[in-house]
Amino acid sequence: MKSEANIYFDESGFTGNNLLDKQQKFFSYASVVSDDIEAKGLVEHIIRKYKIQNGEIKGGNLVKNRKGRRAIDEIIEAMKGRIKVSISNKKYALAGKFFEYIFEPSLQRNSMLFYSTNFHKFVSTILYVELTSRGAMAEEIFEDFENLMRSGDFDGLKALFTATKNPDMSPVLELIFDFAIMNKDAIVDELEGYAGEGAGKWVLDLTNTALFSILAQWGMEYSELTAYCDNSKPLDHDQQLFNAMVGNTSKKFTRIAGFDNPISFNLKEPLNLVDSKNVYGIQLADAVAAAFVYACDSSNQDEYATKWRSIIEDVVIYGSVFPDFDHIDLSKLEVQRNYVVLQELVDRSTKDQCLLEGMPDFMAHISHQLQVNPMF
């Protein structure tokens, strides 16, 4: 393990709590390892060579034309091996937040059981498909959910907690809808006093999660980290989790779906929230972040989009948020089991029964039954 590193962070596609923004479908949070002298030299070289106006590298502007994309590509080549990026499909991220705040309050005493069986990904992927292909009903539910999380106004939850159903609603969305309605008290208790207040105003924003995940990955390579982040409101509101990592030398992991993922790192000092105009490493991270938002848009098919897509596996960290449709492929036993589990949770909610009692045994029984007699 190497001793220490200065890491610079910036984002592209930021829309805060508004994950349904139609103009910004992806959120990218990028990091580069460098130092002030190297970063300054590279930025000044790029500005001179490509005649960039205003004396500052802005990735969002550069990706709009071929010369700008060539400039970004030169930065990526110069930083090769020292880049890590978290990137998220924002609609799918919103679907994941929906599970976290609508399902988990009722399941939290044994939530790891549901995460370890990918039940959360089953629900999130179904919601994502509904949101992107079905249209109106799913969109209305998600808009009300976003409004709740932004404002904390529970009176605005018309579509989510009403008993009125759209006749075009799919059977699985109807089950999810029924679960939300019948467990609304647990949801309200969990969110009241948090949503729309302080850091809660940014509860749907992806910045903190992305930054923490990237730092945890860098912590596997460097024993001590110094983080420089472009100033942002979500980070300004809540640094408690990051402050807990100052001077932390322990290595901790969590196991989800068969993978051990780092959840700790050692910060030399609290996060440095800085102005990108004055910190050259931030400008490099800004260019990298914009490149991967550009690459993830399938409508971009030029040589740079193709090249950057080819290195996604090398630089994009585990934990980036994209739908995997294997999680709703009903030919798979896991998916069949999760569908039956969703039915069971709704049935227990209807009968006002405990949602968790005997659930591990129920899952094991259903898995065995489906092995013997699969659902087609």
Image (tube, grey):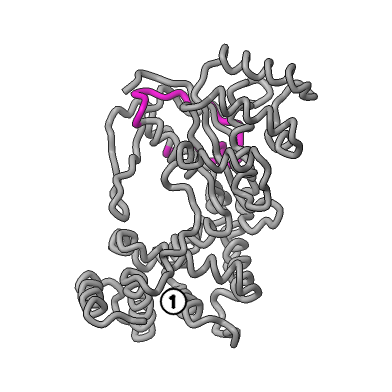
Q: Is residue 6 left or right of residue 150?
A: left
Where residue 61 appears, as percent x and y from the top left, is 74, 36
Residue 88, can we see it? yes
**Image point (36%, 71%), residue name:** 335
Residue 109, can we see it? no
- The residues colored magenta run 220-241
Asked where in the image residue 51 lies, by quadrant, the reply is top right
Whether residue 81 appears in magenta in the rendering, the answer is: no
Q: Is residue 73 above or below residue 262?
A: above
Observer-nearest residue: 329 or 146? 329
Asked where in the image residue 235 lies, by quadrant, the reply is top right
Asked where in the image residue 339 lies, by quadrant, the reply is bottom left
**Image point (35%, 70%), residue name:** 332
**Image point (40%, 22%), residue name:** 268
Q: Dividing the image into 4 quarters, which one contains the N terminus?
A: top left
Q: Dividing the image into 4 quarters, which one contains the C terminus?
A: bottom left
Query: Disc 1 marks which residue?
Result: 179
Q: Residue furthest front?
A: 303
Q: Is residue 312 above or below residue 281?
A: below
Whether residue 226 appears in magenta in the rendering, the answer is: yes
Where residue 319 appears, as percent x and y from the top left, is 43, 47
**Image point (63%, 71%), residue name:** 140
Crowding near pointer 1: few (<14 within 10 Å), some, many (20+)? many
Q: Amino acid at mark 1?
A: Phe
Where residue 18 appears, as percent x and y from the top left, is 63, 55
Observer-nearest residue: 213 or 156? 213
Observer-nearest residue: 156 or 334? 334
Q: Is residue 140 left or right of residue 47?
A: left
Q: Is residue 166 above or below residue 367?
A: below
Secondary structure under the numbered disc 1 in the rendered image: helix
